[in-house]
Image: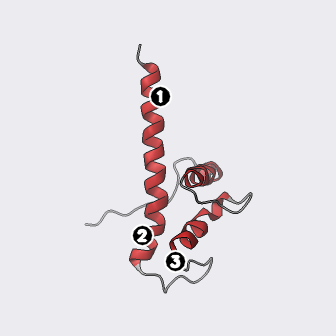
């Protein structure tokens, strides 16, 4: 049986913080979100990849195109979180 993915955050009110983290990580990768709108970072990433993502109907996108957008964002976030955890662990060592 396939595992279902849940897009819900454990802390429901954390959406704004997660969006800010995404925008911060992608800024380090050279992709800027529109000023004051970190929730729109996926459109900036799509544009940088040449993928026509729009706020409404994206039924014409291939799975590969959608994966490139999400993979670039998610991969960068995971790498940054691992780096942060390693730094925290290094600070704890005597």
Query: Looking at the image, is 9 positioned above or below residue 5?
Result: above
- Using a 10 Å C-alpha cutoff, classify the residue at mark 2 as few (fewer than 14 neighbours), some (14 to 19) or many (20 or more): few
Residue at 49%, 59% (x, y): give it.
Answer: 73
According to the image, label 2 marks what residue? 67
Residue at 42%, 81% (x, y): give it.
Answer: 62
Q: Nearer the viewer, residue 82 or 7?
A: 82
Query: Looking at the image, is 16 positioned above or below residue 52?
Result: above
Res 67 quadrant in image:
bottom left
According to the image, label 1 marks what residue? 88
Residue 27: give its label.
none
List x then y, in percent, for residue 26. 56, 55
Q: Secondary structure at mark 2?
A: helix
Quarter of the image containing the N terminus? bottom left
Alpha carbon separation for disc pair 3 and 1: 37 Å
In the image as oriented, which residue stretches furthest toward the top? Answer: 94
The mark closer to the camera, 2 or 3, is: 3
Left or right for 21, reference 34 = left
Q: Which numbered disc, 2 or 3, marks the residue that appears first in the sequence? A: 3
Residue at 70%, 60% (x, y): give it.
Answer: 37
Q: Secondary structure at mark 1?
A: helix
List x then y, in percent, for residue 29. 53, 54
Res 64 quadrant in image:
bottom left
In the image as oriented, which residue stretches furthest toward the front? Answer: 30
Q: Nearer the viewer, residue 48 or 12?
A: 48
According to the image, label 3 marks what residue? 51
Q: Which numbered disc, 1 or 2, marks the residue that appears first in the sequence? A: 2
Alpha carbon separation for disc pair 2 and 3: 11 Å
- Label 1 close to label 2 by CB (< 8 Å): no
The mark closer to the camera, 3 or 1, is: 3
């Amino acid at each position: 049986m396939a595992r279902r993915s849940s897009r819900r955050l454990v802390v429901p009110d954390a959406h704004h913080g997660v969006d800010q983290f995404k925008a911060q990580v992608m800024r380090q990768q050279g992709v800027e979100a529109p000023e004051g709108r970190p929730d729109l970072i996926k459109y900036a990433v799509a544009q940088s990849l040449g993928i026509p993502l729009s706020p409404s109907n994206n039924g014409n996108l291939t799975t590969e195109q959608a994966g490139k957008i999400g993979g670039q964002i998610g991969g960068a976030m995971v790498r940054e979180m691992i780096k942060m955890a390693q730094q925290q662990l290094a600070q704890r060592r005597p």
